[in-house]
């Protein structure tokens, strides 16, 4: 049984079984060209999580079907520049893509473009997320590109953030949001290249309502977890921690066993398990409640993305000593 999926910088799409300690390649490695086939974003294609949609650096959208075990091409994203940094499924099997150039586009699975106007969120988009409870609300942010909330149907911003206050030396703090998530129905959390974790509440104000500076290195990965109003975040030195966002931002504890930057984190929504991947070529499974690393598997390649399955056998994995 497959417990998780990972996308590599070489373009390899892998299925991971932590119970067996095995990794299976879904595509042909010999056909990959890293500069073109690097996987830059992934999401599930259905609620049963039998399909995974992945996007390559050449903007080709791929579909993996776990039932047929086929990894096939859907279409190529055109009319934009740069890499696809985010994608998600909308209602009626529509796919929305966000390019680093700022272009937001909606497609059918056959590759028909449904957005005729020039919908653009601004240059240098690094972060993208869709509100889980709504198929018509998304958010974007990036380098010198403030956090914005968008209405998918009207293609208009419903809310946008303001620049944060200057630092203690009265110097401007650069805008560099690397990842974002809808924390709940009302709040949004972002992590930045300036080592900040920020919480925004569009109901109250345009500036962050809470903020924490976590160490002095860029924060690169973010995920929600089974604990309400908690997140897991990590930086370029592999310092992954669990944070309590109730009434502020508080570091509860760090997870051990990392070496190098963590590029992607995926935590289970109801069980105390989180997987992480990065540049050290290892896939790690941690138990959030016990803080212990349950499993570590060598994947041979650097990885960019990971997704944990809701139905998995992580609870049956024996803890490594």
Image (cartoon, rainbow, N blue to C red):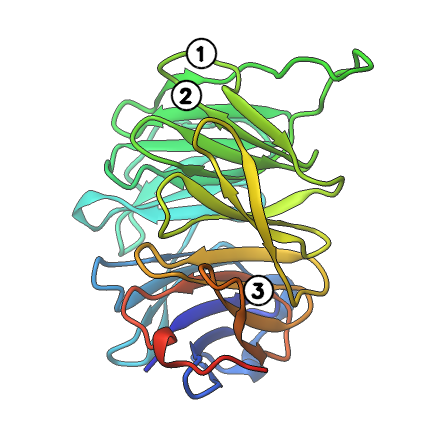
Residue 268 disc label? none
Residue 127, given in percent of the width and then of the height, sits at: 52, 39
* Circles 1 and 2 in contact, beta carbons < 8 Å: yes
Instruction: Using the image, determine if residue 101 lies above or below residue 263.
Output: above
Count all numbered tags in the image, as a single digit: 3
- Is residue 32 shown left or right of residue 206? right
User: Secondary structure under badge 3?
Assistant: strand
Kindly tell me whether residue 224 is visible in this rendering: yes
Q: Nearer the viewer, mark 2 or mark 3?
A: 2
- Pointer 2: residues within 10 angstroms few (<14), some, or many (20+)? some
Residue 33, given in percent of the width and then of the height, sits at: 61, 71
- Is residue 141 shown left or right of residue 114? right
State the residue position of label 1. 205
Instruction: Using the image, determine if residue 11 lies above or below residue 78.
Output: below
Q: CA distance from mark 1 to mark 2?
A: 7 Å
Residue 153, given in percent of the width and then of the height, sits at: 25, 27
Task: Choose top left, top right, bottom left or bottom right for residue 279.
Answer: bottom right
- Pointer 1: residues within 10 angstroms few (<14), some, or many (20+)? few
State the residue position of label 2. 201
First in residue order: circle 2 vs circle 3: 2
Q: CA distance from mark 3 to mark 1?
A: 35 Å
First in residue order: circle 3 vs circle 1: 1
Quadrant of the image containing the C terminus:
bottom right
Instruction: Using the image, determine if residue 289 lies above or below residue 4.
Output: above
User: Secondary structure under badge 2?
Assistant: loop
Q: Residue at x 36, y 81 (%)?
A: 316
* Circles 3 and 1 in contact, beta carbons < 8 Å: no
Q: Nearer the viewer, residue 25 or 315?
A: 315
Residue 198, given in percent of the width and then of the height, sits at: 55, 29
Kindly tell me whether residue 57 is visible in this rendering: no
Residue 277 disc label? 3
């Amino acid at each position: 049984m497959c417990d998780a999926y990972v996308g590599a910088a070489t373009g390899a799409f892998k299925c991971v079984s932590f119970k067996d300690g095995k990794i299976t390649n879904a595509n042909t490695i010999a056909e990959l060209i890293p500069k073109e086939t690097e996987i830059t974003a992934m999401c599930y294609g259905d609620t049963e999580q039998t399909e995974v949609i992945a996007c390559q650096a050449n903007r080709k959208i791929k579909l993996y079907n776990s039932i047929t075990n086929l990894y096939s091409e859907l279409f190529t994203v055109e009319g934009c520049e740069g890499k696809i940094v985010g994608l998600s499924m909308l209602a009626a099997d529509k796919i929305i893509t966000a390019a680093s150039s700022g272009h937001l586009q909606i497609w059918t699975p056959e590759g028909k473009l449904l957005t005729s106007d020039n919908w653009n969120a601004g240059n240098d988009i690094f972060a993208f997320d869709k509100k889980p409870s709504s198929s018509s609300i998304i958010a974007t942010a990036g380098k010198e590109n403030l956090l914005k909330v968008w209405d998918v149907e009207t293609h208009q911003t419903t809310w946008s953030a303001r620049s944060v206050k200057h630092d203690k030396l009265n110097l401007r703090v650069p805008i560099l949001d690397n990842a974002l998530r809808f924390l709940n129905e009302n709040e949004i959390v972002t992590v930045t290249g300036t080592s900040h974790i920020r919480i925004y509440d569009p109901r109250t104000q345009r500036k962050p309502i809470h903020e924490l500076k976590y160490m002095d290195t860029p924060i690169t990965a973010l995920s929600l977890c089974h604990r309400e109003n908690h997140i897991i975040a990590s930086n370029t030195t592999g310092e992954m921690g669990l944070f309590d966002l109730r009434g502020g931002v508080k570091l509860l504890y760090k997870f051990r066993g990392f070496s190098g930057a963590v590029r992607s984190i995926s935590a289970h929504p109801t069980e105390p398990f989180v997987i992480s991947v990065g540049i050290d070529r290892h896939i790690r499974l941690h138990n959030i409640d016990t803080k212990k690393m349950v499993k570590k598997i060598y994947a041979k390649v650097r990885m960019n993305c990971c997704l944990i399955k809701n139905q998995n056998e992580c609870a049956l994995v024996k803890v490594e000593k």
